[in-house]
Amino acid sequence: TTLFATADLIQQSMMGKLDSIDWAQTARVALVGFCFHANFNYHCLRGLERMFPGGGIRRVSLKVFLDQLFAAPMTISAFYIGLSTLEGAEDPLEDWRNTFWTSYKVNTRNTGTILHKCKY
């Protein structure tokens, strides 16, 4: 919740909204993070660890790959659809349709970069 709310506040300040922070938006972002993301990520990562216990570069890479393949699309979707629903959007899927693939590509590219740097 704190991570999501802080990220939203940073985004608003970088967009020049420091004088007029939209606290309702920050609350919605925090609510989606608290109600869905925290629980989902906990259980998903716990499940991956139970299915593939241990560490090492191959085991961790497998867990990250599976996380990016299955969990990332669900969490990105829940974020955009959840926010649109809380904002009372007429079509809660519109924002998701416009932003999902860009968000997913950035997410997987960043994860790949991190894994590559860990390997070397």
Image (cartoon, helix red, strand yellow):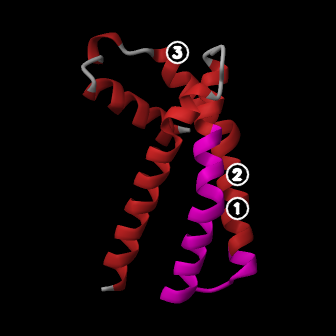
Q: Which mark is residue 24?
A: 3
For marks 3 and 2, the one nearer the N-term is: 3
Q: Label 2 sits on what residue type?
A: Phe
Magenta part, dominant SS = helix
Q: Are marks 3 and 2 in contact (CB under 8 Å)?
A: no
| Residue 7 in sight in this render | yes
Q: Which residues are magenta?
A: 49-78
Q: Which residue is mark 1?
A: 44
Quick one: quadrant of the N terminus? top right
- Identified at 33% across, 10% down, the residue is 20
Residue 77 at x, y percent in the picture: 62, 42
Crowding near the residue tagged with mark 1, few <14, some 14–19, many ≥20 C-alpha atoms within 10 Å: some
Q: Are marks 1 and 2 in contact (CB under 8 Å)?
A: yes
Crowding near the residue tagged with mark 2, few <14, some 14–19, many ≥20 C-alpha atoms within 10 Å: some
Q: How many marks?
A: 3
Label 2 residue SS = helix
Q: CA distance from mark 3 to mark 2?
A: 23 Å
Quick one: quadrant of the C terminus? bottom left
Q: Which residue is mark 2?
A: 40
Label 3 residue SS = helix
Q: Label 1 sits on what residue type?
A: Cys
Q: Does 52 appear in magenta?
A: yes
